[in-house]
Image (cartoon, rainbow, N blue to C red):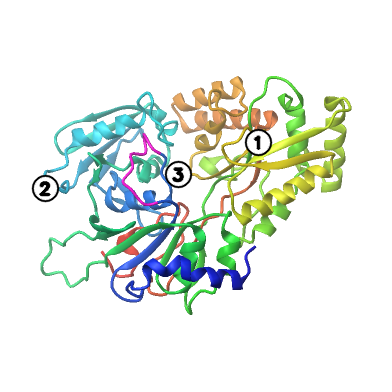
Amino acid sequence: MPSRTLLAAALAAFLAAGAGCTPPDAGPIAVSAVGGTPRLANPSRDAVDPPSAYLLQTAAQGLVRFDADGDISQGLAQSWIISDDGLRYTFRLARAKWPDGTPITADEVVARLKAVSAPGSRNPLKPAMGAVDEIVGMTEEVLEIGLKAPRPNFLQLLAQPDLAILRNGTGAGPFRVAGQTGGVLRLSPPKSDDEESDRRPPPDVLLRGDSAGAAIARFEQRQAALVLGGTAADLPLARAARVPGGASLVFDPVAGLFGFAFTPVLEGPLASADARQALSMAVDRAAIAVALGAPNLQPRESMLPPGVEGLAAPAVPAWTGGTMPMRRALAARTLAPLLKGSKLHLRVALPEGPGYRVAFAILRRDWAAIGVTAERVGPAAPADLRLVDEVAPASLASWYLRHFECGGGLVCDTAADQAMEAARNAQSQDARRAALAEADRILAGAAPFIEIAAPVRWSLVAPRLTGFRPNPFGRHPAGELVRGSP
């Protein structure tokens, strides 16, 4: 991990371009998000990193959005009605307009949402949107989404930036892109229609993408009021930062997948579920959780977190009750007949970052204890296992399980796919939960994934941002960063 001296020495290089910026305790809110230059990317065509996701949620909202607490709030829709059977969602649009002043119509929203599930779409929510039966415009201001079966927490999906509504590369607010200097976008809040309101509008936002080191350095020098998009990869840098007085390192209580997924093979030891179970049981998840240093991070040996969508008891392998010495002894005995005297060497693909390196070092140590060697390779290199570090977009068990459907490039089981299809079409919540539990049980036996814990998501927050609140989705609306903003 870089020393404080090295970090301080790097400040000049990081901050030279921003030496004349407005201090974060007055004027616009300077936001550094970890990633590339923010752009209004189409999530159905291009990958979206944290800076672009923040731009989408700020300047190209969907039908609904998350508020500062992670609850559902109005977006383009001013109201919605859910049918008693949970199958139909009817939305009435607010009188929102595109930047050129033309009204947003229901047909435009319908077209954008249909594109998410179109052939060739790369939208990360495409599998979850498979629950949609139809999307139709009823009038210019009203549209309806029909589901194949009731789906709890469906509005949480619609609030994600991946379902933002765009037209010709522009969004419909609530903030507007007011200008760009270098890689910094200026986002301005909407004008109030209430001339008598005594509430001050929220400040402008100056959004930029940065490496984690550069973002932290800007924050240390009070040239950024907010750092977003931090993960386990860069948490050691954030913990070493000398944050200004009153500022905080804040963790969002997100759920999701953080662990290592097996890539499929047709032959060899890793084609056996027993071998994959052996590698999984040898890993000391508690040691990794402690080494990452995120408060309250609990190790997890099940793919599903407890309580998701009413499944109080996720499936876990039988070995979870044993001590680490017992588990490693069982793992070695399990691997021995599969290896037939040969050695097993694993390639593990994961991005750069000191936190990821710490996790891999423990993983390699644990496998060495059962005679298995491992090397870290780049995220695009051929590998036997790949890091998965993703926040769940909604509290849906299906989101976790569909990562391991056949055809997705990871180890799968056709019986689990059949159970997932039954869950998608189930006409009652009891039937859906039963089918999801069956898919979970099958995948727990197939061992396609070594779950470690929930993902880690952190932010650096200046004391000025009195409206910032950690929430289960890690979404922090620009209009609510300062308490009292509309």
Q: In this view, does 265 lie to the left or right of 339?
A: left
Secondary structure beneath disc 2?
loop
Pick the front one: 423 or 339:
339
Which of the marked residues, 3 or 2, is nearer the chain's N terminus?
2
- The quarter of the image holding the N terminus is bottom right
At horizontal 86% and vertical 43% (from top left) the residue drawn is 326
Residue 110, percent from left and from top? 25, 33
Residue 407, percent from left and from top? 53, 23
Whole-number angstrom distance, CA of label 3 to CA of label 1: 23 Å
Q: Give the range drawn in magenta.
A: 37-46
- The quarter of the image holding the C terminus is bottom left
Secondary structure beneath disc 1?
strand
Which of the marked residues, 3 or 1, is nearer the chain's N terminus?
1
Q: In this view, does 342 lie above or below 414?
A: below
Q: Residue 229 carries which label?
A: none
Q: In this view, does 288 lie to the left or right of 17?
A: right
Q: In this view, does 287 lie above or below 317?
A: below
Pick the front one: 257 or 339:
339
Whole-number angstrom distance, CA of label 3 to CA of label 2: 32 Å
Residue at image mark 2: 101
The majority secondary structure of the magenta stretch comes to loop
Whole-number angstrom distance, CA of label 2 to CA of label 1: 50 Å
Residue at image mark 1: 385
Q: Is residue 381 magenta?
A: no
Q: Is residue 383 above or below residue 298?
A: above
Residue at image mark 3: 393
Residue 162, percent from left and from top? 37, 41
Secondary structure beneath disc 3?
loop
Pick the front one: 83 or 291:
291
**Three-letter amino acid code at disc 2?**
Gly
Task: For marks 3 and 2, give the one nearer the viewer.
Answer: 2
**Three-letter amino acid code at disc 1?**
Leu
